Amino acid sequence: MKVLKFGGSSVAQPDRIRGIVEILKDYYAAGDHFTVVFSAFGGVTDNLIEMSELAARGDDRYGQLFQEFADRHQLAIGELLTNEKLQQETAHQMRRSHEVLKNLLYGIFLVREASPRTMDYVLSFGERSSSYIISQVLQQAGVPAEFLDARRIIKTDKTFGNAKVAFEKTYAKIKEHYREHPKVQVVTGFIASAKGGLTTTLGRGGSDYTASLLAAGLKAQAIEIWTDVSGVLTADPRRVEKAFTIPKMTYAEAMEMSHFGAKVIYPPTLMPALQNRIPLYIKNTFQPDFPGTKVSEESDPDGEAVRGISSINNVALCTVSGTGMFGVPGIAGRIFGSLAAANINVILITQGSSEHAISFAVQPSDAERAREAVEAAFAFEIARGVVNAVKVERDLSVVAIIGENMRYQPGIAGRLFRALGKNGINAVAIAQGSSELNVSVVISREDETKALNALHETFFLSDYKTLHLFIVGVGLIGGTLLKQIDQQNDYLRERRGMELKVVGLANSKKMIFAPSGIDLSRWKESLVQSSIPIDLAVFVGRMRDLNLSNSIFVDNTADSKIASFYETILDESISISTPNKIATSSGYLQYQRLKNIADKRGVQFRYETNVGAGLPVISTLRDLIDSGDRITKIEGVLSGSLSYIFNTLDGILPFSDIVREAREKGFTEPDPRIDLSGKDVARKILILARETGVPLNAEDVHVNGFLPEEAMAAASVEDFFNVIEDQAAYFNELYESASREGKVLRMIATLDSDQATVGVQAVGPDNPFYTLSGSDNMIVFTTDRYRVRPLVVRGPGAGAEVTAAGVFAEIIQIGSSLS
Ligand SMILES: NC(=O)C1=CN([C@@H]2O[C@H](COP(=O)(O)OP(=O)(O)OC[C@H]3O[C@@H](n4cnc5c(N)ncnc54)[C@H](O)[C@@H]3O)[C@@H](O)[C@H]2O)C=CC1
Ligand SMILES: N[C@@H](CC=O)C(=O)O
C-alpha cells in the first residue's frame, strides 16, 4: 500500500486535476495498491478564512466570497465531469454541502464571532469539497474510488486549529476502515474529529500529516507527497537561484530543514513515518517522472557534509546579561521557565562559557512579552544592578547549515564563518547542538539572501560560484574588459566553476543595473537606452542595497571622484580591482587607510595594473618582500606610451604624430599630457615605493621633465597637440643628440633607498633599457637575494588588451578568495 498526497497547488485548476487523474490511472493500471489524500483547491483555505473574518466583523461582503467559492467548485465539476449522471449527482451533493456552509457563515455574521472551533468546521469545507469532486472524477476515469471524510478515522483532542492526534485510536480506526473498504479511498487532508464528532484541524499544512498518519496506520510501504516543487531543495529557490533537489536525506535532516522554513514538508508529518520506518518521497506533480527527494532512515556517509541550507526570515534576539549570572545555578532555568510560563516559543539559544550572557531568539511578535517575562523573573537582580535589563535586537534572521555528515567533520564551521566574513556578514549569535546536525547563525535580516547564496556556493561546490561585478568606466580598458569577460565566461564556468555577472555598469553619462546579469553582447545599447543618469553616490548605494554575495567593484576610469568612494565601498565589504592610479598615488595616509579598511573587512583592494599594465610588477614586489627579501633599488621604464614614442622616433616622423599614434593605440592616459609630463611615471614609482614600505608623497618624487614650458602650460589636449606640433624641431634635436652618440631616449624611474626620481636619459647599448622595443616596460629589482643579477620583469606595459586582461585576472583572483 502507498499513500499519496496532493497539495493545494496540485489541485488549483481543473487542468492540473486532470494531470493527477492521469498519474493515478497509471498507478491503478500497474496494479499498485494506494490511497490518496487531497488538500483543498489552491487558495481555498485562505478564502474560507477571509470570508469567516468578514462575517465575524459584520461585513456582508463575505457573501460575495462565499458565492465565488461555490461557483469555483461548480465550475470544476462542469469542466471535469463529462458523465452526466455523475456530474448531476456531484453538483447536487456540493450544493447541499455548501448550503450548510452558507448558513454557518450567516451564523457567524449574526453572532459576530468565529471561534477556533467554528473556524475548524468552516475550513473543513475546503478539503471535503475538493476530495469529493476528485473522487467522482476518478470514478469517471475508471478507477474504483470512494470518498472518505477523514473525520471518521482521525481522532484528536479539542485543540482547535492545531489538534493533537490520538494515535492508537486513529490507527485502529484506519485499519478497521480500510479492511472494510477495498476501493481506492480518496481522503480529505487536514481535517479530523474530536470527541462528540466535533471537527478539528491538524494545523496549516496538515494534509501531509494526514498522509503520514494513514501510512502509519496501514503500515504502508511508502508515502508520496506530490507538490509543485521537485522535492526538497538545497535552499529556498526563490532566494538561491542555484538551489537543486536533494535526492536523499534522513528523517532527521528533513526535520531540521522543515523546522527551518523549508515549506515542502509539514514538520509533524515526519514522526509517524520515522517511527514506522516508512520512506517518504517528495515529488513534483508537474514533472511526474523526476525522482524528487527520498526521505528515509538510510544515511549516506560518503555524501556531502552539508545537505541543505535554510533560514528563518524574521526573528528577534533577546539577551540577558550581568555580573550576577556567573557561576549561579538555575539562571537558565529561570529564564526559560519564565518564557514557558508566558507560552513563548524559543527558536535558538546561545551562551558563552563566561556565563556572562544568555541570548535567545523568538518570533518578533513575542519579543516584547519575552522581555517582560524575563525582567519580571529577574526583578530582584535587575533592581540591584547585577542583571541588566533585557536587550532586544530586531530585524534579524537565522541561517543554518544542515546535514548529518557534518558530525565529527572538522572545518565545516570554519568554511561557514569564512564565507560570511568574506561577504561582510556579521554573526550576531551562533548556535550548534552537540548532535552537530545544524549550525545556526543569527545575522542581520538584510543580509539573509546574500548569506544563503554565499553558503550555497561554499558548500555545494558541484555548482559554480557567481561573482557580481559593478563596473564604472567603459572606455578603452573597461570596454575591452567587458569583451574579454563575455568571451571567457563559458570557459570560466566550465573549467573554473566561476561565473562573472556584470550587475551594475556606468559610463560618464548613464548607469544600468540588472541583478540577473547585463547582457554583455549589447551593453552599449543598454547604456544608451538607460534612463538613469550617472550618479556615483547612487551607484554605490545601489550596490550596497542589492547586497549580493561575492560583489566586486571595478573602476576603469582615471577619475578622482570615483576613487573618493573606495573607502565607503571597502567598508561595505566589497572588494575593488582598478587600473586607476589616483587612489594609490594621492595622499599617503589615504592609501594606507584604504589598505587598512580592506584588511579589517577581510576584502581585497587590488591595483596590479597601476604599474606595468598586465605585467606582474606589484605582485612580484610583494612576493619578494613577503618572503623576507629586502629591496635595495628599483629602476624601471614604467611608461608604455613613452617607450613607444621614443622607440618610434626616427628623426623623420613628427613627434606630435607619434604621440597621436600612441594615443590611438591605447597606450596613453585619457589625457596624454599626464604621460609626457612624467606625472604618470612619477605615480608609478611612488606606488612601488609605498609597496616597499617607503611612505612617499607625490611631492617627494623628483621629476626631471623634457617637455617645453609652453607644452606643459597648454590649456587643453588639443592645445597641447598644437604646441608639440610647433615644437617639432625641439623634439627632433632631442632624438638626434642621443642618436649621434649611438644612444636611445628612455624615461627612467629610480627608487634608491627612499629617494625617487624620474627623468629622460639617453642610454647606450651597455644599458639594460637600451634594447626595449614597442611599448615595453622593464622593471629591475635589486634586492639582497638578487644583488648581483637583479630580477627583471619585462613586456608590453600599456594597451587595452593587456591591461584589461590584468584587471580580469585580478577579478578572478579576488573571486577565488571569496567564500
Ligand atoms: N591604457 C592603458 O594602457 C592603461 C590604462 N590604465 C588606467 O586605466 C584607466 C582607464 O584608462 P582608459 O580606458 O585608457 O581610459 P578611457 O578614457 O578610454 O576610459 C575611461 C572611461 O571612464 C569614463 N569615466 C570617466 N569619469 C567617469 C565617471 N565619473 N563615471 C563613469 N565613467 C567615467 C570615461 O567616460 C571613459 O569612457 C585609467 O585610470 C588609466 O590610467 C592603467 C594601465 C594601462
Ligand atoms: N599611460 C600609461 C598606461 C598605463 O598605465 C603608460 O603609458 O604606461
Image: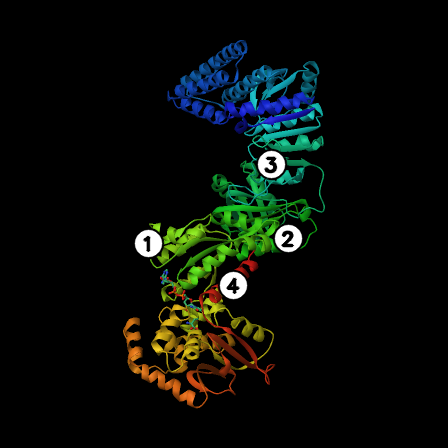
Badge 1 marks a residue whose secondary structure is loop
The CA span between labels 3 and 2 is 25 Å
Identify the residue under disc 3: 231
Which amino acid does the dot numbered 1 rest on? Pro
Name the N-terminal-most of marks 1 and 3. Answer: 3
Badge 3 marks a residue whose secondary structure is loop
- Taking the spot 49% from the left edge, 59% from the top edge, the residue there is 484
Which amino acid does the dot numbered 2 rest on? Ile
Q: Are marks 4 and 2 in contact (CB under 8 Å)?
A: no
> Taking 573 as reference, is 230 left or right?
right
Name the N-terminal-most of marks 3 and 4. Answer: 3
Badge 2 marks a residue whose secondary structure is helix
The CA span between labels 4 and 2 is 28 Å
Location of residue 792 in the rendering, given as x and y in whole percent from the top left corner: 55, 78
Location of residue 303 in the rendering, given as x and y in whole percent from the top left corner: 69, 46
- Dot 1, crowdedness within 10 Å: few (<14), some or many (≥20)? some
Location of residue 236 in the rendering, given as x and y in whole percent from the top left corner: 54, 41
Number of marks in picture: 4
Q: Nearer the viewer, residue 559 or 488?
A: 488
Res 160 visible: no
Badge 4 marks a residue whose secondary structure is helix
Identify the residue under disc 2: 412
